[in-house]
Image: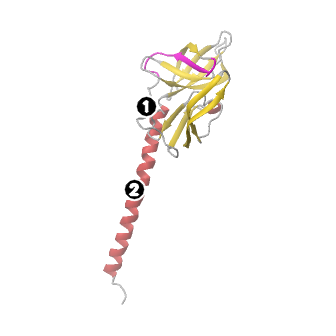
Amino acid sequence: RPLGIGAALWIALVVLSSWLVADEPVQTAEQDLKAGVERARACVCKVECLDRAGLTTPSVLSAVAIDDEGYLVTVGLRLLGDRQLCVRNHSGKKFEARWIASDHVSGLTLLKVEPGVVRVPKMSQKVPEVGSTVMVVGNPFGLSHSVSIGNVSGLDRSVNLSGGVGRGLIQFTAPVFPGDSGGLLADRNGHML
């Protein structure tokens, strides 16, 4: 016996409502990821080396705030000659930066800017798991505050470095390009890993 118009409408309504409810978690997950991206981008700055004339050289890196006093950490900065440093925060505003110290084995470099230039990232409270979504925020090829998304592909990795071994490292699949060095590796909430 064929269904009446009322029964057919009721079935269509049930199917439509279940489709809308099923789509809601996907939209929420994407909205949460976008909010995490914005949190992470605010914690990264673009590091530019200036020559004597104040012009930007090809050396562009990324740095992350590590405290409220204005200290930043980056990787791979080699100061040559009389170069000055400046950073640009996520809104593009330019600030003077000072070199504080470098570790020649790891390449880590500590910089100082005035407090409040860059937001300090929250640390992730969760230990990352293989397969977890991660993001890298940096300045690839000088393109400010770009975001790459990937996954954790390995934990507790060891890598031979010139002069030592890096241990306890997180391996991830998000693309990293020149200029991303010193950028932020964050979980999907924008919290530092």
Q: Residue 156's spot in the image, x, y percent?
A: 55, 35
Residue 185 colored in magenta in the image? no
Residue found at the very far left of the displayed protein: 6
Which of these two is toward me, 86 or 26?
A: 26
Q: Amino acid at mark 2?
A: Glu
Give the distance between the C-alpha atoms of the residues marked 2 and 1, in whole angstroms: 28 Å
Crowd band around label 2 with a 10 angstrom C-alpha radius: few (<14), some (14–19), many (20+): few
Percent across and percent down for residue 123 are 43, 31
The N terminus: image quadrant: bottom left
Q: Tell me the residue that label 2 is attached to.
A: 24
Between 15 and 154, the residue placed more toward the observer is 154
Secondary structure of the residue carrying tag 2 is helix
Among the 4 quarters of the image, the one containing residue 67:
top left
> Whole-percent x and y of residue 110?
54, 17
Vertical placement of residue 39 versus 105, above or below? below
State the image coordinates of residue 103 (x, y, percent, origin top left).
Answer: 60, 17
Image color mode: secondary structure
In the figure, 65 relative to 137: above or below? Answer: above
Magenta stretch, main secondary structure class: loop
Residue type of the residue flagged with mark 1: Met
In this image, 95 relative to 17: left or right? right
Please report whichever mark, 2 or 1, sits nearer to the chain's N-terminal start.
2
Residue 105, quarter of picture: top right
At x 50% / y 29%, what residue is drawn?
90
Residue drawn at x 43%, y 46% is 31
Tell me the residue that label 1 is attached to: 123
Q: Is residue 91 left or right of residue 179?
A: left
User: As rendered, which of 52 and 68 lies closer to the eye?
Assistant: 68
The segment highlighted magenta reads 104-117
Q: In the image, is residue 80 above or below residue 165?
A: above
User: 70 left or right of 156?
Assistant: left
Identify the residue at the far bottom of this view.
1
